[in-house]
Image (spheres, rainbow, N blue to C red):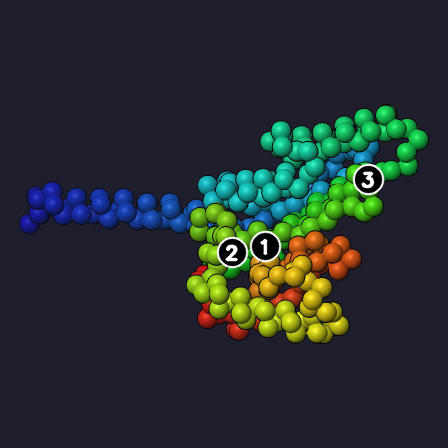
Amino acid sequence: MLNKSPFGLKKIILLLVSLVFFFGCNEDVKPLEFETSIINTSYKADIEVSFDKAKTTSDIAKKVNTSITSEILKSIPNSEAHKTIEDALKAFDNDYIEFKNEFPESQQAWALAIETEVLYKTENIITMGLSTYSDTGGAHGNDSIQFLNFNPETGNRYSNEELFSDVEGFKKLAETYFLDHMKNEGSDISEFFFGKSFQLPENIGFNEEGVILLYNVYEIASYNQGYTEFVIPIENVQQFLKI
């Protein structure tokens, strides 16, 4: 005999709706894949730009791509008024053309190089390295490396504090590796941090070897010291990690 109560049918409908919702949502949390975007426009200045973009059109991918674009724009001189990388590069090139028109005898050539690389990718974190170099005259150009750490589940950037459950404990560990690195390099610790105590770098990232700590030029020492970079094996850091 058929059950004429609608209760059983309602349960089935709710179950089907839940399954559709579950699988629909899961489409947005698929692992992000990246592709390289190269800008091939011909410029008067020496400009080379290639960067990674998340392939999908999910909200998570859009967040990641927006963040990448934002950081690239910040790295281009005088790009505050521009919303796209292409517009910022065109403005940089126009500034160079104006410079050459004003000082035709100058041999100074302007240069701009921007490149990203996905260094590490797991279900918990994606680390991307952003390398920039610009030269618009002066004793030397300006170069820097930045680590962008993304939460693959949300597309948001991790702050350094969000990576660690015990920042002070990690800092003490990092200092021992820093001192060992300086000793191996034959460098004097007194030449770093401008007379202050040890500080963690602005850029902390991940690769297959472990946690990367990178100090940019001028961050803790003079220009002549260049970059300072070392890696702490992941197994030694695990107890301090939050992710």
Q: Secondary structure at mark 2?
A: helix
Identify residue for label 1.
Answer: 202
Is residue 67 in view? yes
Q: Is residue 189 left or right of residue 17?
A: right
Cβ atoms under marks 2 and 1 closer than 8 Å: yes
Amino acid residing under circle 2: Asn
Under circle 1, the secondary element is loop
Determine which residue is flagged by label 3.
Answer: 137
Give the alpha-carbon distance from disc 2 to disc 1, as whole Å. 8 Å
Q: Residues within 10 Å of mark 2 (few under 14, many from 20)?
A: some
Q: Position of residue 216 (x, y in %)?
A: 67, 55
Residue at figure coordinates x 75%, y 60% from the top left: 225
The residue under label 1 is which amino acid type? Glu
Lower position in the chain sequence, tag 3 or tag 2: 3
Q: Nearer the viewer, residue 141 or 84?
A: 141
Residue 37 seen in the figure: no
Residue visible at 63% across and 51% down in the picture: 146
Point out the tag, 2 or 1, that comes first from the N-terminus.
2
Measure how far apart labels 3 and 1 are at the Cα level: 27 Å
Tag 3: amino acid: Gly
